Image: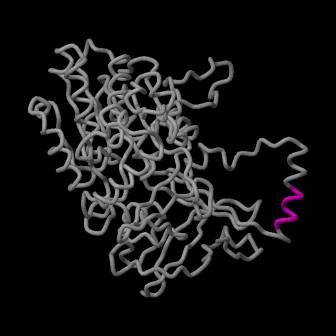
Amino acid sequence: MALAFSAHIPALRRRALRARWVPAALFSSGILAGDKPILVRDFVRSALYDPNHGYFSKRAGPVGVLDASIRFNQLEGRSAYMQHLDKLYKKHDIAWFTPVELFKPWYAYAIAASILRTANLSVPLKIYEIGGGSGTCAKCILDYMMLNAPPKVYNDMKYISVEISSSLAEKQLETVGEVQSHFSKFSVEHRDATNRSGWGRKDPCPCWVLMLEVLDNLPHDLVYSPDQVSPWTEVWIEKINGSSQASEVYKPLQDPLISRCVEITGMNEDKASVGEKLAFAAKGVLSKVLPKPRRAWLPTGCLKLMDTLHQALPSMSLIASDFSYLPDVSIPGDRAPLVSSKKDGKTSDHRNYLDAQGDADIFFPTDFRLLEQIDHHCSGFSKEQKNPGAFKPVKKRRTIILDTAAFMEEFGLPLKTRTKDGYNPLLDDFKNTKFYLSVPTHNRK
């Protein structure tokens, strides 16, 4: 819902402006504790990961685990697959199955194959997985390495899961422990991957970092402008006089992460031509008559995580996969999230992100081009030539963005997820998901 705002903009620079009252029974659950305003990213983090009230911290239930792999070659086609999937959701009564679970072991096998094809096998293989869910990906990758890699690679490898949820950390140990030989190679570190201190000293050795459906649940910030030309402001959330209501408060950009994200996206850059500046002036006149509020969600959680990873693991290779587009989003703003909860087997989407009270998932689409910009930025690359006459800056990362179908056709076994009539849910139904691969141009010391 668009916010009504005064046309007197200069006051933005002098004081914070309050927008609207947002009824929300947030406070009994502890998602919004205390009387001080908080940034939107802190609200999202609390709603998802608070140890006592967060969506992912309450139980392992939101993440489904299949008892056995789906035998796609025994299903007639799409209709039969959808019926089978519907039965699975009703049987398990969970919020969702991840792709790595639905298509096990083949999805994880493709990731393992891409690692094995490109890794430097002269050094012990080390894999970090952030947000490993139920542990299915870890187990399947270890299975693949045991079956297909040279024995020394499997025997010497280490697989470290970095998991913020204690219940999921326990589930991962249980899942991987089904194969006794995997247990000595696998460990779980129950911590926040964005916290630099948790990684210890900088490790210059090559390693791999996996993030599967992680970016969509990282905290985001929200910026707001009351019309088409006014400066962006950062959004804070505050309690109203100790009541069970919340309001958004808008302040000039001052948070370092938000400011960096705005800089990386180029939202405030002025590179307009003369004609564009004239159009901008006309838009400024129009904005006073017909103001159109603007909102944009910024992946500040991703920026913080990438900062941490590049500082702690400067020679890492990265594989990330996620949704590049989410349908039927009713929450306003560029890169806006879906807020979804499930009760009595029925899924409901919320129109207000403040409705999330620890019982709702908050997931964002991933702008993969922006992820690429953030990756290069955190690696130390800058587009700007600091010294006149100096060599053009050279990127420190080689990156590629692939549709899921392209990734699976390159590294996987697509026939394994095809039904009798040729329908392939992994290739046909995941067109709004992508893979991001990033490797260092050379090993940095």
Residue positioned 35% across, 47% down in the render: 194
279 lies above or below 130: below
Residue positioned 51% across, 60% down in the render: 338
Residue positioned 40% across, 77% down in the render: 26
Front-lying residue, 431 or 271? 431
Front-lying residue, 159 or 413? 413
Queried whether the magenta region covers residue 286, the answer comes back as: yes
* Total number of numbered discs in the rendering: 0
Quarter holding residue 99:
top left
Front-lying residue, 409 or 306? 409
Q: Which image quarter holds the N terminus?
A: bottom right
Residue positioned 71% across, 75% down in the render: 5
Queried whether the magenta region covers residue 249, the answer comes back as: no
Quarter holding residue 186:
top left
* Image coords of residue 287 (percent x, y): 82, 66
4 lies above or below 228: below
* Image coords of residue 441 (percent x, y): 46, 19
Question: In the image, which residues are magenta?
Answer: 281-287
User: Along the horizontal axis of the image, is 393 left or right of 81?
Assistant: right
Front-lying residue, 212 or 333? 212
Q: Which image quarter holds the C terminus?
A: top left
Magenta residues: mostly which secondary structure? helix
* Image coords of residue 321 (percent x, y): 44, 38
User: Along the horizontal axis of the image, is 369 left or right of 135?
Assistant: right
User: Along the horizontal axis of the image, is 115 left or right of 158?
Assistant: right
